[in-house]
Amino acid sequence: MARIIDGKQISEDIKTEIAIKVKELLDKGLRAPHLAVVIAGDDGAALSYVSSIEKQCKGVGFISSVYHLSANTTEEEFLATIDFINQDDEIDGYIIQMPLPKQVSIDKVTAHVSPAKDMDCFHPENMGNLLLGKECYLPATPHGVIELLKRSDIETSGKNCVIVGRSNIVGKPLAMLMLQKSVNATVTVCHSRTENLPQVCRRADILIVAIGQPEMITAEYVKEGATVFDVGVHRIEDATQPKGYRLCGDVKFDEVSKICDAITPVPGGTGAMTTACLLQNTLTARMKKL
Ligand code: NDP
């Protein structure tokens, strides 16, 4: 059985480190870091993520604000909310929660976000800095995977890393991070048109999966002794569970954990790290103002 990479514990360690820094600020009579979230509409998963962010902000001593607009909000109103937050000196950083209502253009929204307050690396300037290996706020989910690698002592230098998924929020930025000289992996990025996907995945020493396909990655895709990071998260109907559902990832955990060396579970793996990394970015933004 593979070693379980405990994202929940590692995220708790990061939050403890953050809470200590916040206490130091407060002890000096300084303001706590302040993270805001902009959300429109009533998507259940999005609302529950936002309320988890609020709870975790409270847990580390942060101030949090939620700007909750209606699903019918106009693009003008949405952009005006972002402008308002950009100008509020007491807000250190914010994220825009997806999904956006269809009348609100994602391109206009990302262009409006202030790069200095862009806690999830949405703005093209921050994405460009990420590509160039320059300092920027790292996107939370990919950053979470990197932190897990580092804090679990997994060797990355010269290793073959295969990333399945090329989205702008996970696959592509993760590929950039894995290529950086502090990580030094040899990176292959796959997507829905990749031929012989199982064969390509079996080359991976480190396999990272972010495809949004429940339990698609079976043992056939995994080399014996590989390290597997599962970014996917799904709620699957399951009548045997008290709640009538269970959570799973993009990887078939029971099968893959028998042949790989280390693996992240769902829940309690990469997902647990996202908010911790968001809080870490917000603390950095606050510290920059001192
Ligand atoms: P997207 O839907 O934006 O991207 C999915 C990617 O996977 C695309 O590049 C797509 O290829 C590729 N893909 C889809 N099906 C296949 C297939 N059968 N074979 C090979 N490649 C495939 O997803 P996201 O990146 O936003 O999210 C991926 C997963 O991660 C989801 O389950 C999501 O819920 C989860 N997630 C978790 C987060 C967290 O834990 N905090 C945060 C963000 C996401 P193509 O480009 O060709 O269409």
Image (cartoon, rainbow, N blue to C red):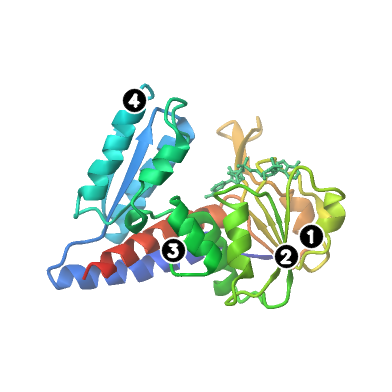
Which label's residue is closer to the chain start, 3 or 1?
3
Q: Which residue is drawn at 87% across and 50% down?
A: 196
**Residue furthest left as drawn:** 29
Q: Does the residue labelled 1 lie within 8 Å of ligand 1?
A: no
Q: What's the mark number on residue 42?
A: none
Which residue carries the number 3 mark?
A: 12
What is the distance, in whole Å, between disc 4 and disc 2 at their CAs?
Answer: 48 Å
- List x then y, in percent, for residue 61: 26, 59
Residue 224 coordinates in the image, percent (x, y) = 83, 66
Residue corresponding to mark 4: 73
**How many neighbours does mark 1 have within 10 angstroms: few (below 14), some (14-19), or many (20 or more)?**
some
- Quadrant for the N terminus, please: bottom right
Q: Earlier in the sequence, mark 2 or mark 3?
A: 2
Queried on whether the Cβ of the residue with tag 3 lies below 8 angstroms from ligand 1, the answer reads no
Q: Do the residues labelled 4 and 3 touch (CB within 8 Å)?
A: no
| Mark toward the start of the polypeptide (1 vs 4) | 4
* Visible residue check, residue 196: yes
What is the C-alpha distance between the residues marked 3 and 1? 27 Å
Q: In this view, does 91 lie to the left or right of 156?
A: left
Which of pointers 4 and 3 lies earlier in the amino acid sequence? 3
